[in-house]
């Protein structure tokens, strides 16, 4: 699922260093140089030969990429901070991925919302505007290495300006929507948007 929360497999004893005065940290966050792995269920194992990403419009029109086609798309390097709703933040992380602008190029849509879907069944919803304008990527490398399965490999959504549960691991598709509807965690009490700088963690935040 996502990097968010899921307490069952949280490493015991993990403690980040608090840097309350670090201007790069949103309120309520602490800094870690580790990359905690938090998952609610088993990690999907997706063979590259089986991997497929589907972009579906509100009319049902679909664009599909297999791994070879996806990796042939132009990719970019991204250095960005990431923030988990469980309060850890990691600064200046290095990724490589394909911009959603590339995947959405030429798509005709009146949609204003999107639902990301993962292998394993996880979903999360986002405004489509938050996937455009060089703000979101399908990432396949982290720290110069292929993205490890526990961090969402072979590919995950990366939307670093929102809490990390919005950056769906093991991404398999995005569906464009005319009307918003909640994803997995948003249906269970987490904020519909998830801006870390506004501490939008739960309903009502």
Image (cartoon, rainbow, N blue to C red):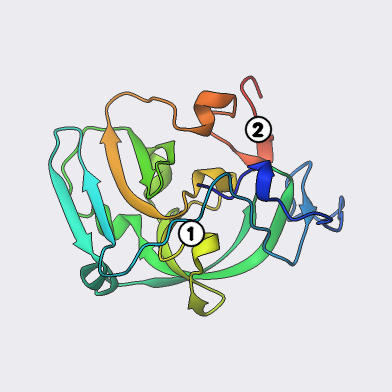
Which residue is denoted by mark 2 in the rendering?
201
The answer to which quarter of the image holds residue 154 is bottom left
Q: Give the x, y percent position of residue 8.
A: 67, 44
- Which label is found at residue 57? none
Q: Secondary structure at mark 1?
A: loop
> Which one is closest to the eye, mark 2 or mark 1?
1
Element at label 2 = loop
Q: Is residue 30 above or below residue 123?
A: below
Q: 100 left or right of 150?
A: left
Total labels: the figure holds 2
State whether residue 85 appears in this view: no
Q: Locate the C terminus by quadrant.
A: top right
- Residue drawn at (87%, 52%) of the image: 21
Residue 184 at x, y = what percent?
48, 33
* N-terminal label among 2 and 1: 1
Q: Residue 190: image x %, image y %? A: 59, 29
Q: Residues within 10 Å of mark 1 (few under 14, many from 20)?
A: many
Q: Is residue 132 left or right of residue 96?
A: left
As measured in the structure, the alpha-carbon distance from the residue carrying label 2 to the one carrying label 1 is: 22 Å
Residue drawn at the location 34% of the way across and 55% of the way down: 100
Residue 64, given in percent of the width and then of the height, sits at: 18, 55
Height in image: 97 above or below 131? Answer: below
Q: Nearer the viewer, residue 8 or 65?
A: 8
Marking on residue 152 = 1
| Contact, mark 2 vs mark 1 (Cβ under 8 Å) | no
Residue 170 figure quarter: bottom left
Nearer to the camera, 38 or 140: 38
- Residue pushed farthest top? 204
> What residue sits 67% from the left and 50% below the top?
9
Alpha-carbon neighbours of circle 2 within 10 Å: few (<14), some, or many (≥20)? many
- Say above or below: 61 vs 149: above
């Amino acid at each position: 699922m996502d990097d968010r929360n899921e307490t069952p497999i949280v490493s015991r004893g993990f403690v980040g260093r608090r840097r309350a005065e670090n201007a790069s940290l949103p309120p309520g966050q602490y800094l870690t140089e580790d990359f905690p792995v938090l998952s609610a269920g088993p990690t999907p194992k997706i063979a590259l030969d089986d991997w497929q990403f589907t972009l579906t419009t509100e009319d049902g029109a679909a664009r599909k990429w297999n791994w070879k086609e996806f990796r042939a798309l132009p990719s970019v390097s991204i250095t960005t901070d990431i923030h988990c709703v469980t309060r850890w933040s990691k600064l200046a992380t290095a990724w490589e991925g394909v911009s959603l602008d590339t995947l959405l190029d030429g798509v005709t849509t009146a949609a204003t919302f999107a639902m990301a879907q993962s292998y394993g069944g996880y979903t999360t919803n986002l405004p489509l505007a938050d996937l455009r304008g060089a703000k979101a990527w399908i990432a396949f490398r982290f720290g110069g290495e292929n993205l490890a399965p526990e961090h969402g490999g072979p590919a995950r959504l990366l939307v670093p300006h929102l809490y990390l549960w919005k950056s769906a691991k093991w991404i398999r598709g995005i569906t464009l929507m005319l009307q918003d509807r909640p994803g997995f965690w948003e249906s269970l009490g987490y904020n519909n948007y998830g801006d870390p700088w506004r501490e939008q963690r739960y309903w009502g935040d």
